[in-house]
Amino acid sequence: MHLNIIPFVRYRYKGEVVPCPICNSKENKPIARIDRRLKPLSTVMCDDCGVFYSNPMPTKAELNHYYQNEYRKDYQLAFSKPSAKHIEKKRNEARSRYEVVRREAAGDRLVLLDFGCGSGELVHEFATHGHEAHGFEPGATYSSFARSAKALDITIQSADFRNAVYAPKQFDAITMLHVLEHVPDPIAALEQAYAWLKDDGVLYLEVPNMQGYEFKCFEHFHFAHVLGFSRDNLILALRRAGFRIRRELSGTSMVAEKAHKGPCTVAIDPKAAAARNHADYSQPVSMLAYVRYHLRRGYRRLLAD
Ligand SMILES: [Zn+2]
């Protein structure tokens, strides 16, 4: 059996102790010592901006190895190609996400990039509507699947953001949907997106909202998510990379543009976010509550299927 799905067994990584990947603060508090699979994983919360992060942080080489070889097996049990259920869910998501891009970016034939495109449904959606569609994805299984669709004019690179090759100011819009929480150097990723965007381009960014869960505990930490955002520290990260917020769609789903368009008028208070996150996540959660929560969740899924 694949070792990563067995509880209590350590993940195969050493990692390195790092300052906060968003604000560089070295002040943090331990929040969880295990993850949702009950495997040892050390998660801390930054005292200054409230972001959660794995510390020790897996190194880029360790994460590259993980994403290229293990991630999809761990999280979607996809050993050779994405499952039919996964593809159907992603196609539905792609339709609504395309509508957001269409509303925000002006022009009839757009040049679009899905940053971390997974199995490529959103790139295909862009191409289906007649746009020039690009994407990149480090996972070998998913990037080759994304490329396999015939008859559509799409370009998929099997790469991460550090070695994907695009021209500066190439894109009218970049989507970065449930990607940034996987990246140990998020400011560098956002700066790269900034460099690839045209001056009037838009970035549509979404990550899981750590404030969005009714049950807040180690359940929401796992090896693939090296960062856990809430609204204020996500906006802080965008600002550090040169963006301003054009529109907040929900807590951690937003549309950003280059800051030269004017001052950012959106107010943030990262210290208050840190205090709130600390209050929510540092409460000890009993194993009984954890088991009850999962039984209820399993029951709801059963009804939904
Ligand atoms: Zn911080």
Image: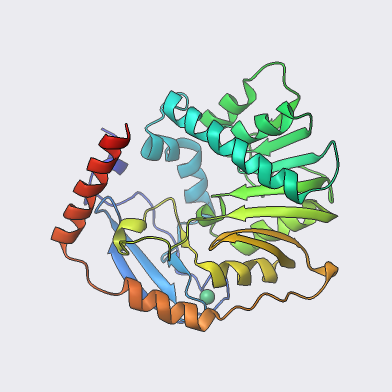
Residue 185 can be seen in this image: no
Residue 14 figure quarter: bottom left
Residue 127 can be seen in this image: yes
Quadrant including the N terminus: top left
* Relative height, residue 17 to residue 87 (above, below): below
* Relative height, residue 251 to residue 180 (above, below): below
* Relative height, residue 30 to residue 175 (above, below): below
* Residue at the image position 47 percent from the left and 60 percent from the top: 209
- The image shows residue 86 at horizontal and vertical percentages of 45, 31
Residue 236 figure quarter: bottom right
- The image shows residue 134 at horizontal and vertical percentages of 72, 36
Horizontal side, residue 249 vs residue 105: left or right = left
Return the residue nearer the eye: 131 or 300. Answer: 300
Horizontal side, residue 78 vs residue 284: left or right = right
Horizontal side, residue 71 vs residue 49: left or right = left
Quadrant including the C terminus: top left
- The image shows residue 127 at horizontal and vertical percentages of 73, 29
* Residue at the image position 75 percent from the left and 58 percent from the top: 194
- The image shows residue 11 at horizontal and vertical percentages of 33, 50
Horizontal side, residue 294 vs residue 105: left or right = left
Return the residue nearer the eye: 29 or 83. Answer: 83
* Residue at the image position 84 percent from the left and 50 percent from the top: 168
